Image (spheres, helix red, strand yellow):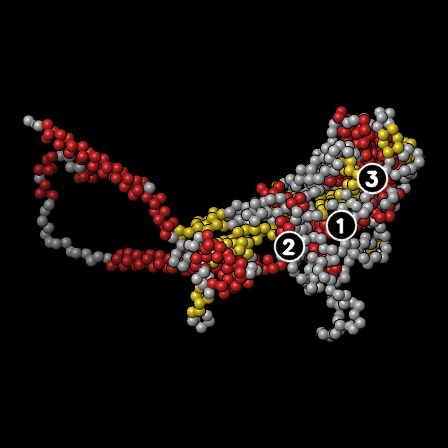
Amino acid sequence: MSDLAYELFPASPRRVENPERRLRPLDAPQRRRRPKLAYGIIAVAGAVAIALAQMTFSILTTQGTFEVAALNQQQRDLNYEKQMLYDEVAGLGSPQYLAANASALGMVVADTPSYLRLSDGALIGAGQPASGTSSVDAIGRGAVQNALIADTPLVTAPDATIQGAPMAESTGDSATPPPIADGLPTPATR
Amino acid sequence: MTTRSTRSSRRRTVVALSVVLAVLIVFVVRLVDIQVVNAREHIDDSLALGFGASQTLFGARGEIVDENGDTLAGSILLYDAQLDPMLAQDGITRKDENGTSVKVSWPDLAAQMAQITGQTAEEVEKIVTDALAVNEESRWAYLKQGITTEQRLALADLGAPFLTFVTHPARTYPDGAVGGNLVGFVGRDGEALAGLELAQNDCLSSENGTRKYQRGKDGVILPGTQVDDPAVDGGTLQLTINRDLQWYLTQLIAEQAQNVGAKSGTITVVDAKTGKVRAAAEWPTVDPNAYDASAPEDRYSRIFSGTFEPGSTFKALTAAIAIDAGGQNPGSTVTAANRETFPNGATVRDPTAHPTNNYTLTGVLIDSSNVGISKFGDTVSAQTRYDYLKNFGIGESENFGLGQGVGELRTPDTWDNQTFYNTNFGQGLTTTVPELVGAYQTLANGGMRMPLSIVEGCTASDGTVTDVPDATGQQVVSETAADDVSLMLENVATQGSLAKQVAVPGYRLAVKTGTGEKSDGMGGYKAGAYFTTMIGFAPAEDPQYVVAVTLDEPVTVKSSAANAPAFQKAMTQVLKTYRVMPSESETPELPKFG
């Protein structure tokens, strides 16, 4: 048994008989030591720092939450805008719209092409002149429906739609030339 | 000494006490249960009641795109506007620019709403009147379902607190009827109803997620309470279809079918090397954006659901079989009269009168002689012909879930004497457009049949690709046999009666027509009604694309000549679309007569 054990567990009854031996009067009161101020300051400062940090984090998180909410709102608005724009252009890229616009301009779906080989300038294909008639009538007999753009006017013929619609009275044969508004028309080739 | 009465009163006390005790114990147990055992659950419940909120995160249904990635079917959000009729009838009080309150009466408000939704003011007022007529305290009615984002925001700007909006994902088809027969459509409730939308629903469908959170006073999510169960978007379904080509052919077949007064018409284009379907156009067809505008029978694909007796287009298959298994070649000859009775008693006649000719196999195909091809068919057994036809894919249609059309090819033991010969020229059996196109793809591809495909693949939202078509082919006839048939079909194009109409300048073309008789449903054939077909491929020296044009009961021209203009234009457009170089050689002329 160690000494400590003896002290903790006084086993011998003899010792219990004289308990007063353990308490004895002091000659003079022990000099009181001043409590170390530094420890106190550190402890209090630590507690304050922790409290401050916690508060700061809390404020930041709350601020962040509001920021997130604002951004969410912004995202929602942008989503709405995106959807509106998508709805607006839906169908405008469809082949029948493009074709109807092109035929309103007088463009045709032509016959077989011929190819020029660059290396020797050889003509591949029949080399026949194009007939100038379209193989399908994309505007007069538009048969490929699209409910998204059924009422959307063509860009090139504002009073017609892909549904065929009244073809604009032929302007090409007019006796009086159209007035020149923006100077002489120039081809936009680059 | 205890009397009887004191004993009974003591017993009563004991009983009463024990009952009270029992009840107390029950209460204690329940208290512990509530406060300790299930405490967490109840706290959660109370929080959910007080601050909890959840919102559905909508997963977007996958897009359907064409071979170049252009969208054929996409997802958008629509809204259902609902109102509270009881509140609505009172009108609202709105602040104007100066901050003064202005009362807006219900009729005025209804007029403003009507202007946004495209209804009339009376219609809007009627919704409220009707709802209140049924129930005086009605709190709910639809203003309009399926309004757009723009309309929704405009309605919200009216500032009417009795208006609410429910978001629902919807489908949009930017190209309208282009490929509508294939893509199919989705109903208003989001359920796939037809076409690939239905057949490939597993690929396309999405899973909605939820977001749970606790909400502060301003609807702000309390920090740290948000739990997301993210939505899973549907996969992107890429088709082998080319939408520009599909549009052109749809427009073309509509014009042609109307020109000849046909009931319906189809054009199908298949890549000769890979079996990929590049276009499958038909008229009449459906615009998936407004599918209820089409007749119910027009909302589905005829190409994949219709069967027909092919007629003479089958002669090319019989010729290939006779060359591959019967030892024949393009120069082999038979004598064929205009009408002949065979030893088994069957009588075969040719559609046009001609003297008894000494036809080559090539000549038989050029003049489309039923008698001649029947004699060439005789060079192999019925079972051999049957087996070859099976290998060509006849009676085994691949429809990709777009229809139930399967050709009916009975086993040879059920063929009667007439059917024995009729099957040589495509009568007495039925087929479908995909089967016929598949058979010609085999001939165009050196005898190697590639399985047809219309789906390029399904790319899930996590990037995994599934449903990639099988690319293993099957050699049906030898390359020599296939090339011989190709050469003969070229001579059909150059020497046949429709040579001028079908010629595509600059290209070598192989073609065969078919004018199939139509069953009248009573064991006979309809008089004067035919299902006409023209099928071919180009450039014949190295075939790239197979094109098939069919017309159901053309009126103004009853033979396959009705198909010629559409076939010529379709083939021209296909060759242009894919920049196929013109042929640098001429078709070698084969003799028609021996």
Can you identify the residue that label 3 sits on? B486
Q: Are marks 1 and 2 on the same chain?
A: no
- Distance between the alpha carbons at the discs numbered 3 and 1: 32 Å
**Which subunit holds the residue at mark 1?**
B
- Secondary structure, mark 2, is helix
The residue labelled by disc 1 is B258
- Up-down: is B468 above or below A128? above
Residue B11: % across, % down: 15, 30
Report the residue that reaches farthest toward the left. B1
Q: Nearer the viewer, mark 3 or mark 2?
A: 2
Q: Quadrant of residue B202?
A: top right
Mark 3 surroundings: few (<14), some (14-19) or many (≥20) residues within 10 A: many
Q: Chain of mark 3?
A: B
Query: Do marks 3 and 2 share a chain?
Result: no
Which corner quadrant holds the C terminus of chain A? Answer: bottom right
Query: Residue B459 vs residue B335: left or right?
Result: left
x 44%, y 69%: residue = B102
Across and down, in percent, residue B98 comes to 44, 73
Question: The numbered mark 2 sits on a residue in which chain?
Answer: A
Q: Secondary structure at mark 1?
A: helix
Q: Residues within 10 Å of mark 2 (few under 14, many from 20)?
A: many
- What distance separates the C-alpha of mark 3 from that of mark 2? 43 Å
Q: Contact (CB < 8 A) between labels 3 and 1?
A: no
Residue at (46% x, 54% y) in the render: B133
| Mark with earlier residue (3, 1) | 1
Please give the residue where the numbered disc 2 appears in the rendered image.
A147
Residue B514 % position (x, y)? 80, 40
